[in-house]
Image (cartoon, rainbow, N blue to C red):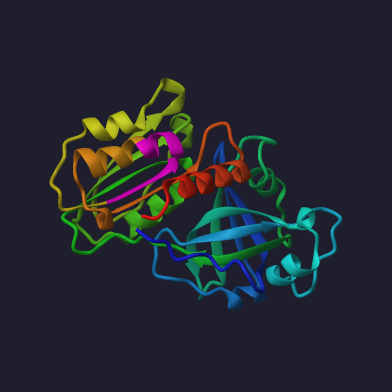
């Protein structure tokens, strides 16, 4: 399924942190808003994602902040780094946009920022992009992912109509990382714990297969995503337009290295 790209060039959406909530030991929710929220243009996808922009400390950027000008006027080493996050929710009436961040102490870029964030802090973002929302005509829904996909999966099950069957598989560190999923649909959730050797791909493979009339969403660490891509497309022969599948990250690689690897794989694969 082709993605609608996040808006990467031009002026960024400049928000401010309104409040912070600790959802689990390793998940922090940032609620942002302010005058800049008027520049945000939502889309129809439940996996709507934005690029959160992190400035390089000590670098002066053009004002108003504009990624195109940054690329044209500043050396490459001064380019801000970006991380991709799902819009957990957007409420125009309340003036709030919500992002959930996975945190592991001082590891990474976005997680430590979320831990330090305080009301009034700046939040720059570009987007949103997206590609997936649950199909209304599907006989059932399969959603599988880890912590990185949890916000998108939670948004998807909230959007499912009443009574629609869905199987959800979520891999998290342990029971403390589980979150309540709100839905009107007939959803069966299987939580798997990494600390206990939980294997997401095996759990999906061993679950009863309802029918080929499925709409699937499989996102998260590249290893299990690759396994389930093979399972759905090759073994179950599900039509590609009925599956949204993407590796958000790869074990042992930071975001920049993972993006370079994915780009190299696409180049090696050649035209579709």
Outermost residue on the left side: it is 211
Residue 184 can be seen in this image: no
**Residue 67's spot in the image, x, y percent?**
69, 68
The residue at the point 39 percent across, 51 percent down is 154
**Residue 115's spot in the image, x, y percent?**
68, 45
Query: Quadrant of the image for the N terminus?
Result: bottom left
Which residue is at the front of the view, 235 or 122? 235
Residue 218 is a magenta residue:
yes
The residue at the point 59 percent across, 50 percent down is 21
Outermost residue on the top side: it is 196
Residue 126 is a magenta residue:
no
Which residue is at the front of the view, 238 or 162? 238
Count the numbered circles shown: 0
Q: Would you place residue 105 above or below residue 266 in this image?
A: above
The residue at the point 42 percent across, 51 percent down is 270
Among the 4 quarters of the image, the one containing residue 55: bottom right
Over which residues does the magenta segment extend?
A: 216-226
């Amino acid at each position: 399924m082709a993605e609608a790209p996040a808006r990467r060039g031009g002026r960024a959406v400049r928000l401010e942190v309104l409040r912070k909530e600790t959802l689990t030991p390793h998940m922090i929710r940032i609620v942002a808003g302010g005058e800049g929220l008027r520049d945000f243009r939502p889309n129809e996808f439940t996996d709507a994602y934005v690029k959160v922009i992190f400035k390089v400390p000590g670098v002066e950027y053009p004002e108003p902040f504009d990624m195109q000008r940054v690329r044209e006027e500043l050396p490459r080493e001064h380019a801000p780094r970006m991380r991709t996050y799902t819009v957990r929710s957007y409420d125009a009436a309340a003036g709030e946009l919500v992002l959930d961040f996975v945190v592991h102490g001082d590891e990474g870029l976005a997680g430590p920022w979320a831990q330090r964030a305080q009301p009034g802090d700046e939040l720059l973002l570009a987007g949103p992009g997206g590609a997936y929302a649950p199909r209304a005509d599907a006989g059932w829904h399969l959603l599988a992912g880890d912590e990185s996909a949890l916000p998108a999966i939670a948004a998807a099950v909230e959007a499912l109509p009443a009574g629609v069957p869905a199987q959800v598989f979520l891999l998290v560190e342990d029971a403390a990382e589980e979150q309540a999923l709100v839905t009107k649909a007939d959803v069966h959730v299987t939580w798997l714990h990494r600390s206990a050797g939980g294997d997401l791909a095996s759990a999906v493979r061993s679950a009863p297969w309802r029918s080929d009339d499925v709409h699937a969403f499989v996102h998260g660490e590249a290893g299990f995503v690759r396994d389930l891509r093979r399972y759905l497309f090759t073994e179950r022969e599900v039509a590609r337009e009925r599956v949204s599948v993407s590796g958000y990250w790869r074990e042992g690689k930071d975001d920049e290295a993972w993006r370079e690897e994915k780009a190299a794989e696409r180049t090696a694969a050649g035209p579709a």
